[in-house]
Amino acid sequence: MLIGQGFDAHRFAAPDTHRPLWLAGLLWDGNGIEGDSDGDVAAHALIDALLAASGLGDIGSLFGVGATAHGAGMHGVDMLRETIEYLAARGFVPVSASVAIIGNRPKIGTRRDEAARVLSEAIGCQVSLTATTTDHMGFTGRGEGIAAIANALIERRS
């Protein structure tokens, strides 16, 4: 068994961009998150945790960085599925994962079970999901952006 941790943070896009808000594999009401892909910090942190556990790099090494990178324009759940295929081809399978979302919005509790189910289906094992605020401290507390931290347990199969 191998464990990895991942982190991601993005600022919210300007309201006039009309960017959709994708988080934990779900489309939410409200202004979206900046990023080359859909900006789904929960999915991105989970990808980094899975890759960290395997020792096979990080989201940037797998999907690239920038508007012309492989991951540009991709949805977080599609990136998760591709990450799982990448890991499986190298003998790794996820066993368990958790994601904590850090921010003032959207309110995760109303759709927590749905989001956990979507993330779990994408990686093929149970993903638990929690959310917290920073009590008005820092960029997440001021509502400028959102962050997520994830842990993943994987197993090497021979």
Image (cartoon, rainbow, N blue to C red):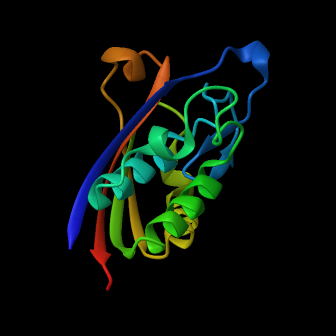
Which residue extends farthest bottom?
158
The relative height of residue 33 versus residue 49 in the rendered view (above or below) is above
Q: Which residue is found at the position 28% from the left and 59% from the top?
A: 53
Q: Which residue is found at the position 73% from the left and 35% from the top?
A: 20
Residue in the foreground of this view, choosing between 158 and 119: 158
Residue 103, image x and y in percent? 43, 32
Q: Which residue is found at the position 40% from the left and 44% from the top?
A: 58
Residue 71, image x and y in percent? 63, 42
Is residue 103 something one can see in this rendering?
no
Q: Quadrant of the C terminus?
A: bottom left
Residue 87, image x and y in percent? 44, 67
Residue in the foreground of this view, choosing between 119 and 73: 73
In this rendering, position of residue 36 left or right of residue 5? right
Residue in the foreground of this view, choosing between 21 and 4: 4
Residue 27, image x and y in percent? 69, 47
Q: Quadrant of the N terminus?
A: bottom left
